[in-house]
Structures are given as structure tokens and as C-alpha cells.
Amino acid sequence: MKKFQQRGVAILIALVVIAIAAAIASRMIWDRNLELHRTENLLRFQQNYEYALGAESWIGSLMHQDLGTGPTVSLNQSWAQRLPPLPIPHGLIAGQVTDLAGFFNVNNLAAQGGGVDPDQLGVFERLLAELHINPDIAQAVAAWVASAPAGSMQSFNSTYAAENPPYRAPMAPMASTTELRLIAGLTPDQYQRLRLWVVALPVPTAINVNTAPLQVLAALAPDVTTSALDAILKQQRTGGFNSLSQFEGLLGQTVAVPIGTDSSFFRLHLDIHFAGSRFHLRSLLYREPSGFFRVYTQTFGAGT
């Protein structure tokens, strides 16, 4: 009987040892597979990023050839055409370049000598009205980006100090239009509508009348007629304007804010499909006076 008990204990101990060994082996296999997947994802991300950098450099050189130091940037030029999907090993690349000078630069609301630029404020108020957003929001955005005396700064920040969590308005140029989500009175739905027509560029910019969309064109001056806008959009499609007098002639009035037919800032959006993964690169390209392009900022992300 004692021998049978000892044999039973031995079998039990053996089973426990086998169970522990199996658990350790299972954990080791799990960790190994996890490391393999991590390595695979990192390698795939790096491959995507290298493809994106190559496409970014290539498109920048094409834009230099297309635009050079020419006096006009217009929608009928090659840079404005969407890049068709280009095959790469195990995937493809597609892209689009957008002229950012065609949109309203919210940092233009800050006057060069301090305070708010009233002419830019008027354009922004009309743009908000075009988008069915309360024009009073323009004052809040202007106060966010414009420097102000210390006393008024404290009064303005009291609005944001009451938020949960509290924060302060920088009273400095926006680094990104995503800061608009923090503006008092601007709802998430209104932000989604507004962000399509505004930019936050690091220097004051003139609106390029050759690439500005309808909503921005309509906000450049008060009471712009539909017939004038139709004529301007038609001219954009057929080569754009060579002079500002030609544009203001079709508009039927002069424009108080700086406008032009040239651009220095462009956004490049690349979408890469590679080996079952997706990678997005958004680059802010700056066109130097020499006509060469350099990358000002980059944002990127991966998806499925």
C-alpha cells in the first residue's frame, strides 16, 4: 500500500513539473512571437517611411521643375494634379499637393505692430458667416493669436481658467489649426467645418487668388456677387490671373488684405499601401526664393 502511495505522489509531482514546464514553454513561445511581430511592425514602418521620404524628395524636385521662381502659382500647373497611384514592390503610393496660400491664415489676424489687424478680422468674420458659424468667434480667435497688454490678457484668460481642466490662451501665433478646438464658443462640429478653409502658417501670407476656393474668395470683400465669383473660378480653371488688377476687375472692388498670385507654402499628403499596411505622411513644404523646396514640418502615422 505504501509503495502505491509513493508511486501516486511521484506521478503527481511529475504532472506538476510537466504543467510548469508547459506553462514556461508557452510563455516563451508567446514572448518570441510578440517580439517577432514587434520587429516586423518596426521594419514595415521603417520601409513605409523610407518610401515616403523618397516620394517626398521626388515630388519636391518635380515642383521645383514645374514652378521654379515663376511669378504665378495656379491650379492648371502640374503640381496641382493628383498623383495617380504609383506601383512599388508589394504596394503603391498616391499623393496630393495643396497650395496653402489659397486658404485663410489665422495668424494673419495678429497685426505686425501688435494687436488685431481689422482688415484681416473682417475677412475672417465673412468667412465664418459663409460657413454658417457665428462671426463673433473671429474675435476670440484673434485674441488667441494676437499679443495684448497684460491687463486685457488676464481678463481674456479668465474664460479659459474656468474650463476643466483650466488652460491659458498663448496670445501668440498658432502652431497648428488644431488649436482652434480650444477656442471658447467654437463647437466640435463648427471646427470640422472651419478647419477645411484655414491654415496656421509661421509667417504672414498673402492669399493666392489663383488657388483660393470659393468660400475664401467670397470672404475677401463685402457683398461679392455670384456672377463675379463664377467669373473668377472660370479664370482659375483656364490659367489664373497674371495681375491683381485683373482679379479686382472681375471682383468688382479692391481688396483690403494682401493678395497675390504666388505661393511659398504647400502641403504634401502621401498615402502608402505596403505589404498589407497603410502609412500616411503630411509634409509642409516651403518654397525658397531660389525655387527649391525644403521640408518645414512632417507628421506621419500608420493604419490598416
Image (cartoon, helix red, strand yellow):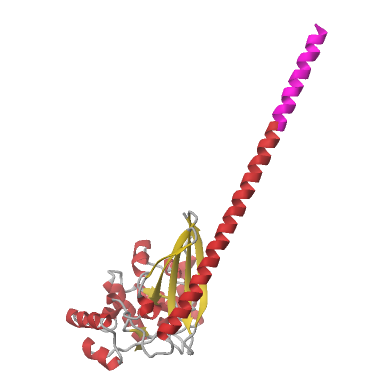
| Quarter of the rendering containing residue 84 | bottom left
Give above or below for 170 relative to 36: below
Q: Residue at x 53, y 62 (%)?
A: 48
Query: In the image, which residues are magenta?
Result: 1-21
Q: Is residue 113 magenta?
A: no
Farthest right residue? 2
Which quadrant of the figure contains the N terminus? top right
- Asked if residue 168 can be seen in this view, the reply is no
The secondary structure that dominates the magenta segment is helix
Residue 270 sits above or below residue 32 on the image: below
Res 178 → quadrant: bottom left
Residue 90 placed where, x, y %? 49, 58
Query: Residue 98: in sight, yes or no?
Result: yes
Residue 223 position, x and y percent, is: 21, 82
Which residue of the protein is positioned furthest toward the top in this rendering?
Answer: 1
Q: Going by the image, does 139 lie left or right of 38?
A: left
Q: Nearer the viewer, residue 166 or 264?
A: 264
Q: Residue at x 62, y 45 (%)?
A: 33
